[in-house]
Image (cartoon, grey):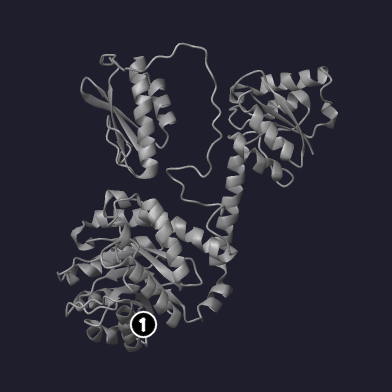
Amino acid sequence: MKVIIITGKLAEGLVKNVSARSKQNVFVHVVNTPIAAFLTPKKISNEVKALESDNLIDLDDIDMIIIPGLIRKDAKIIQQETGIPAYKGPTDAADLQIVLDALDKLELSTMTSADKLIEAEQRQKALEFIENFEKDEKHTNKLLKKPNNILVGNLPVGEDFPMRVLAEIANAPLLSKENLIRKAEYFIKNGADMVDIGMVAGENLAHRIPEMVSTLKNIAGDIPVSIDTLNPLEIESAVKSGVDMVLSLDHGNYEQVLPLMEEKQIPVVILPTDFKRGWVPHTVEERVNSLQELRKKCKKIDVVADLILDPINSRSIVDSIMACHQYHDKNPEPIFFGVGNVTELLDTDSVGVNSLLSGIAMELGASILFTPEESGKTVRSVYELAVSSKMMFLAKNRGSIPKDLGINLLVFKDKRLPEKVMEEFDVPFFSAEGTKKFVQDEAGSFKIMVNEQEIMVVHYKNMKPDVAITGKSAKKIYEELLNRQLVSRLEHAAYLGSELQKAEIAMITGKNYTQDFELFKKPFSI
């Protein structure tokens, strides 16, 4: 395939090097401008026609024109002007190799950059694979006959299925009905496969359980609802109210509730502890042996084994992982992995921790990833686990490492290092001092707020609110503010652009947003 690639002077070397290695027949045209993204389709059309006029190319021999992906306007104009199909390449010249290698099977776009197309195609294929797997009832029923898979409600759970994310509504009885619903809807929207009613340790609030179960069942649909308590009275109330799974049975409470579990055939999570006597196993062998002993006593019901994942440097996260590994080698039932035990007690952004623990859980044969979201640093953990569960399921089925899967959890960093091409400027340089004094905008002022779904900007005139604008895009919001003539000063417009972009980033990442304060800072100077 004969291809013309249009680029600017800054990226010339990189583009030519990549093109020289390509199997395609590439002609690189360097436009007399430092940054090719500043070009327009009209300008590129003129450049291409000039190439033919100068006898450098024959347009009849050219199959395609690739222009920089950062050019904003539609590339269709180029084909209309030259008769040659023109498409957008990648936004970063460093990704040009990928595009050229896939050119014969890749359907490029005149509007969307090639790297985004590739990413979207990979994502679509990945999600289709998971969706088709989940919809295959015949295959699911076959897998459910294996001892390592069970049903929780109508949800298949086990080693052969994607790891299910169980989101805990911590201290649920202390929440109002409205907040209980809001929390459950938030978890479900963010990918929870199951929702857990977290009870209050040391208290008997069994009388609250029927209403909570009924409320959550009404909004959860087919999503299973579980109860997290060791209190036999609360377990009894929950089972009679229709929960789909119980967390948890241990040596201290199983005798009181096991007959009811057997009667109702409710799956239970079992622990190697005896909290009634205050006993907790310490060694790997104690955990495994204790849980196997309890498993024998619960042989008439489906169980999920929780070896208790320890926080880092408490007892030993390594020992708890080893216990999971040893237990799984000896026993077929699903494994419960309490990811929140680690993330809530580690002062690190949760996204990488959740991904890594999901990978470890997958290798251990875990079936349930359990987490609350009880601190700012773990906000969006349910979403992160839902994505990483899919990543690990894809990697497992492809027999690959969890890379280039089509879905990822790259939030704060980019996958590839960009090719940094710096332009030299022969102009005076000044250090920004920012000394301009504040002057009130006569058009009014703004209060900017963020929740997990949108940005809200309230306009104040004479200290009184008069209109509110909502949206998910900083650009759309400030354009609306300008359209409504709510800003009259340049410095106020610049300030709003900065603050709204911070608000959008906070909404996407789950960071707290407070107007006029920094969103990010280097956590620790070394």
The answer to whether one can see residue 383 in this image is no
Residue 480 in the image, given as x and y percentages of width and height: 41, 26
Residue 167 or 519: which is nearer the viewer? 519
Question: On the image, which quarter does residue 177 sit in?
Answer: bottom left
The type of residue carrying mark 1 is: Gln
Residue highlighted by disc 1 = 265
Q: Residue at x 59, y 63 (%)?
A: 398
Q: Position of residue 218 (x, y in %)?
A: 34, 63
Observer able to see residue 212: yes
Q: Residue furthest front?
A: 526
Residue that appears at 36% across and 15% down: 490
Q: Quadrant of the C terminus?
A: top left
Would you identify the image quadrant in which residue 78 lies? top right
Left or right of 150, for residue 106: right
Residue 263 rendering spot, x and y as whole percentages: 32, 86
Rendered-image quadrant of the N terminus: top right
Residue 442, compared with residue 195, is above or below; it is above
* Residue at image location 35% in from the left, 88% down from the top: 296
| Residue 311, percent from left and from top | 29, 63
Residue found at the far top of this picture: 428
Say which element carries label 1.
loop
Left or right of 504 in this view: 396: right
* Furthest-left residue in this view: 203
Could you classify mark 1 by the number of other residues whose Cα lies within 10 Å: few (under 14), some (14-19), or many (20 or more)? some
How many numbered discs sit on the rendered protein?
Answer: 1
| Of residues 332 and 175, the one drawn nearer to the viewer in this rendering | 332
- Give the vertical position of 495 relative to 259 (above or below): above
Q: Residue 328's quadrant in the figure? A: bottom left
